[in-house]
Image: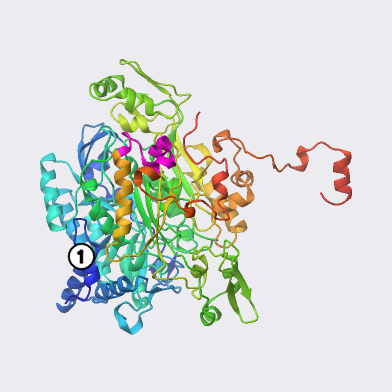
Amino acid sequence: MAYEGIKTDFGPPYFRDMLHPVIAKNYGKWKYHEVVRPGVIKRVAESGDVIYVVRFGTPRLLSVYTIKELCDIADKYSEGYLRWTSRNNVEFFVTDESKIDELIKEVEEKVGFPCGGTWDAVKGEYGLSNIVHTQGWIHCHTPAIDASGIVKAVMDELYEYFVEHKLPAMCRISLACCANMCGAVHASDIAIVGIHRTPPIPDDDAIRRTCEIPSTVAACPTGALKPDMKNKTIKVDVEKCMYCGNCYTMCPGMPLFDPENDGAAIMVGGKISDARRVPELSKVVVPWVPNEPPRWPTLVKYVKQILEAWAANARKHERLIEWVDRIGWERFFEITGLEFTQHLIDDYRITPYFYSEYRTTTQFRW
Amino acid sequence: MSETPLLDELEKGPWPSFVKEIKKTAEMMEKAAAEGKDIKMPTGARGLLKQLEISYRDKKTHWKHGGIVSVVGYGGGVIGRYSDLGDQVPEVEHFHTMRLNQPSGWFYSTKALRGLCDVWEKWGSGLTNMHGSTGDIIFLGTRSEYLQPCFEALGKLETPFDLGGSGSAVRTPSACMGPALCEYSCYDTLDLCYELTMAYQNEIHRPMYPYKFKIKCSGCPNDCVASKARADFAIIGTWKDEIQIDEEAVKEYAKWMDIENEVVKLCPTNAISWDGKELKIDAKDCVRCMHCINKMPKALKPGNERGATILIGGKAPVLEGAIIGWVAIPFIEVEKPYDEIKEILDATLEWWDEEGKFRERVGELIWRKGMKEYLKVIGKDVDVRMVKAPRNNPFMFFEKEELRPSAFTEELKKRGLW
């Protein structure tokens, strides 16, 4: 397709053109890997070729000038190729083992990114990977919390776990700044989720000007909205509203932001990999923590408390939910020191899938 | 005194600071502009810093709902964003996001990246996300009038970059590093991701569906791109025959590894036995969870009869609760040109387009209509591997032809109820 000579729909660059020559040569012919030390993975091909993948944490938000610095380093050490991981880490490829220390030093000095974010399943020693997160106040119109600031504050506190292998099993921490969960944090070992706690206050003018009333009303999952056709606006049954913000997504005339009452819930025990235990959705264990910019001390304290209680008590290879499977939620609340409150008992009108027998894992027998 | 006392707190500490990134961009852009470089938004990053400081003070966002903005011929790929602070921060009055389709597996040449950086330095804020949650490269913040020239400049690069998906569209597919670097990958995730991206260019760039639709390719059940939870259509590599064992390599591990406690006892189906000499895996009981392979990568590898399991419907909680994808196709071969996968995707998208309500994800539609209905749509037979267990209630729908003819059924017909 083309419009007035403008090229469209040509798609992404072909990935084969983006591969380091050793990776291209041994594509699909890797024999095994071993984690040499935190942040460094040695990959050995059937051909005998060896490549060291060296991983660094990033803040996800990157300046084009920083990317160019990473490119300079990749040109020097990595034959002009690099890669990002699914958790916002950046990786270089080194064929000469003796260059690894120099590379790490150069990245840490020039760009300030720490080497780490790996785990060694073979030895049963695990590091913490980077936090997957959303935009927050940087760029989103519906967030209940910031994203980058909280991630920075949490990772500062958990830094040692990123650069070393000190955890008993894999632990995935994620953050979403509202229940839309662009970061899909609903299956993470520890998840921070922005929540609103107040119903929307309809802005009649804005509704008349910018909204389609029937589709906004229909967007409410709890039936809390009614059209007021006489006044061409929307009425809210505040008793039924559970503050999901879906109506605001549909209609700018339904704002529900309250700086004093927005905040974060903490969820735990989610899991995506099929290793050992089947995947699981995260569960709410802290119903609400207030927004405390710039460093969210209460939220950071809870996350650390949960992570360290798990790390101190779990067995080797036991992810958070596997630990809870063994000790029970009773002990979880006892050991973490979190309070079990009425908000932690489900009273949302619809979570039907939870009760279904549909299989949510690739674990089955042939 | 600093203009950003709150944000300055986030420059402290050992973890890389996004505030430093924004400040660095602001300084470098202003400097480059002062030196006469053709830069359209030299104060964009500075403006973002100002607005973010106000958000930190007010404890709320200052971004408004986006309007419809895009480039000629596209319906998506750009997220419109406007500041609600007006004259206070004119630098970010418009601050639209462009989503750029990343190469499969997020592999880059520095040449390609430098091209991207040059374009974004000229036409935007100079700030990016590497990467957004769905996988795209995110160009963070430009004005409406620069969208088109920026897009055209991206298309003219030596390594051109296209927009990704946004809104009610097929979103940019993503893939794990797959066979490029990983010995576990049971199919070519990067190639499938690329081929599907190319096959659905129209569906990615022109929102036409009830809501979003995400496709993710994972090479094995470790699922490094979290496709089970994050994709409406998850293609996860697996195998059907037995795990391949190198007994000599097992013995090497046995010299220092506690195989009994760390491998045998952690097998979810007790399919492994180890007598100190030989490791045996009962293929009939193995559910291919990957734990033993993760533990002994030199000794164990997936079987030879490789393909993928397709899970359908994964999504976050908005709106009717979170779903981890459901097994729709227990096993499918994944070979070029991937016709069968494309046919299944086509049928799924067409049905959902036809039947889905506004903002209803495909998983929610399947829940409303029934998996039985979905299997008819994709022309697949039911399989016990699609469920954890048979249903736990007796409220089954029966087709007319399944019933015995009777006086009662005659009466139903007579009364026009059938």
The x and y percentages for residue A305 are: 31, 49
Residue toward you, B392 or A258: A258
**Res B300 quadrant in image:** top left
- Three-letter code, disc 1: Lys
The x and y percentages for residue B78 are: 40, 68
Q: Residue at x 17, y 49 (%)?
A: A79
Q: Is residue A352 visible?
A: yes
Q: Is residue B160 visible?
A: no
The x and y percentages for residue B235 are: 45, 44
Magenta segment: A313-332
Q: Residue at x 49, y 32 (%)?
A: A364
The numbered mark 1 sits on a residue in which chain?
A: B
Residue toward you, B302 or A363: A363
The x and y percentages for residue B257 are: 26, 25
Q: How many marks?
A: 1
Q: Relative to residue B404, is residue A199 depicted above or below? A: below
Label 1 neighbourhood size at 10 Å, few (<14), some (14-19), many (20+)? some
Residue toward you, B307 or B149: B307
Instruction: Name the quarter where the N terminus of chain B is drawn.
Output: bottom left
Magenta stretch prevailing secondary structure: helix
Its colouring scheme is rainbow
**Res A23 quadrant in image:** top left
Q: Is residue B349 left or right of residue B235?
A: right
Asked whether residue A342 is drawn in magenta, I would say no
Q: Is residue B110 left or right of residue B271?
A: left
Q: Secondary structure at mark 1?
A: helix
> Which residue has dot 1 on it?
B20
Q: Relative to residue B13, is residue A224 depicted above or below? A: below
